[in-house]
Amino acid sequence: MPAAPPAAPGTDTGAGASAAASDPASVTDGTPATSAPVPGDAARDDAISSAAPATASAIASAPATASAPGDAPPGNVAAITQRELRREAWEMAMRRNRVVRWFVSWLPHRVTITLRTVLRWQHSLVAKVKRRWHRSLQLRVISTTLVISALMIAVLGFFLTYQIADGLLANAENTAHSQALAGLNVARSLPDLNVPPGSNSAAENFIRTAARTLQQQTGIADTNYYVVVGLRSYDQPDYQRTFTHWISLSVKIDETLPPALIKNVEKEQDSAAAAGTGDNTLYYAPTTLAFTNGQASMPAITVGTPLGRYYELYFVFPLDAEQQSLHIVQTTLIGAGLALIALLAAIASLVTRWVVVPVRHAAQAAQRLRAGHLGERMTVGGADDLGALATSFNEMAATLQGQLRELEELSKAQRQFVSDVSHELRTPMTTIRMAAEILFEARENLDAAAARSAELLQSQIERFEVLLADLLEISRHDANVATLDAEPIDICDLARRSADDAQQLAERRGCRIEFRLPAEPCIAEVDKRRVDRILRNLLVNAVEHGEGKDVYVTVSGDRDAVAVAVRDHGVGLAPGEEQLVFERFWRADPARARTTGGTGLGLAIALEDAHLHGGWLQAWGERGRGSVFRLTVPRYAGQPIAGSPLPLGPDEADVLDLGSRLSAMGVGLVPGSGHA
């Protein structure tokens, strides 16, 4: 069975993942393959959530499985399913919500799968839109232009529509006023207007005669208003007030005439009767014209006025013509607005394209320039601002190209100078060494001061030879002429042999070098000489800066890589010194003496050797807690690595020791953190 893939950041691992992997129905989606509600899903998710901190703590403290920050975890950490690898932060947050888990546990299996698929599709779509929005200046400009122009056109359209509708309504009211006055004058000339109706038939005859007379003013075929004449009901209690249309009674009087308008007309009629005078006062009210023959209702204006002492006169003016005119205006405004929005979008797209395309070309040219194509230039298309941008970019690129060539030539000259000086110093250095060896061998025949001088001369000449060798090696790396002679080597055996030189220094310091090696060999294709030099340098530095405390060497490997970690418990490193420690001739404390005669180039050469293998050399340290130097190389030469089998930090023994000390002090550890 192949090893499970490494866990992505933010995914659950450990016991919960193993439980999920053991369920055949959870291989793809993590829910049982049944349509009945399964409350056990919530319990299983609770187990996953509760087991996650403990699992993360175990992973962080295990020296053979945990990974450093920024490294991909190894494949043998735990049995992690593909379902957990695909989980994103939002999905994990929903799964940890108890209300969501309770609700989902009672849903059918297929509904749960469909809901999860829809949510993933929605989040994927939103993420793509956000990414496109943030990465496209042209899209943002066009979208902003569309939104702003649409809002402005909508506001302007509403304003124009309101003004036009108000004008049409005012014109309709003026027309209704004129026609109603004319009809009122005609009605007042009718006989029997002020004669009290003696019977219902007499009242109906007068009402029909008045309605027919007033309706015929414009002709039956071109009716532009409807007339309603009514009899006051309380003046003649024996008769019911009748509202009559002039021919077919097609107007629904109760639905058409507003009650408020009728009251106003009756009040005016009472006032006129009390004063004994006639008045031309007209009352207006908006209404809905309803027909008895099933014709569609329409908006209208009702004009009411008293007709003598016994009758009431109403004119209903339909607004269908005005409504059609307003509809045409609205349609025209909407069409013109949409056309204007499209035109503005096209103009914005064209303008932004004029600006964005040269900027995009400049970005592409800058990327190619960053990639090393120093001859990349922009096309100058004019004398405007964009042309000035292209010209300035080309001048900058030319200046940068010239300066880089000068720096390259200067660097090449410096490397050649160092190489030549190192080579030229070898011949006189050999002569000086031979003379120093003769003096060193004859020191017993010399006085004390001369003998001490011979010993110092011998030791400093050896250090100078090491410095010359390091200078030659670093010059090869700078000139990119260093070669890799890779062969399969057991890193465990190589680590033991590399500790021989540091063991003597450790004995003088009163400390030991302890090994934590796996039972199986850790074979990797490496350059034996270079890896041996890296490990010897790390071990000597660990003993020198360990302040007499034991040094631990841990070796571990996985399917793709092998790692060696050297742990000391000395002064450690200050924040930010994890990178500075690999610089040439850098020293954390300039006043600290070099008891081993180091040149200051050891870690710089070790880092270059690690890079030559395609591996990593990383450091961790804290003041008072010591430091860890971790070498990670691929198992096969030229194979890329994605993670390290060893953590870059305190190992399990340090965590347990710290936990025991804090427990004795009454302080607990935060699960999964490794800190108090």
Image (cartoon, grey):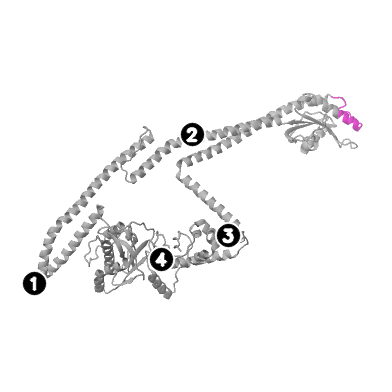
Tell me which numbered mark, 2 or 1, is placed earlier along the sequence.
2
Which label's residue is closer to the chain start, 2 or 3?
3
In the picture, the disc for residue 285 is: none
Q: CA distance from mark 1 to mark 3?
A: 90 Å
- Magenta span of residues: 190-206
Q: Earlier in the sequence, mark 4 or mark 1?
A: 4
Which amino acid type is marked by label 1?
A: Asp
Q: CA distance from mark 4 to mark 1?
A: 60 Å
Dot 3 crowding, Cα within 10 Å, few <14, some 14–19, many 20+ = few
Compared to residue 189, the image places residue 575 above or below, namely below
Position of residue 67 measured from the top left corner of the image (x, y, whole percent) = 40, 63
**Local SS, label 1:** loop
Checking the image for residue 447, the label placed there is: 1
> Does the magenta portion include 41?
no
- Categorize mark 4 by other alpha carbons within 10 Å: few (<14), some (14-19), many (20+): many
N-term-proximal mark, 1 vs 3: 3
Q: Earlier in the sequence, mark 4 or mark 2?
A: 4
Proximity of marks 4 and 1: CB atoms separated by less than 8 Å: no
Q: Label 3 near label 1: C-beta < 8 Å? A: no
> Can residue 630 be seen?
no
Name the residue beneath numbered marker 4. 65
Mark number, residue 100: 3
Which of the 4 quarters of the picture holds residue 268?
top right
Instruction: Locate residue 530: give its quadrant.
Output: bottom left
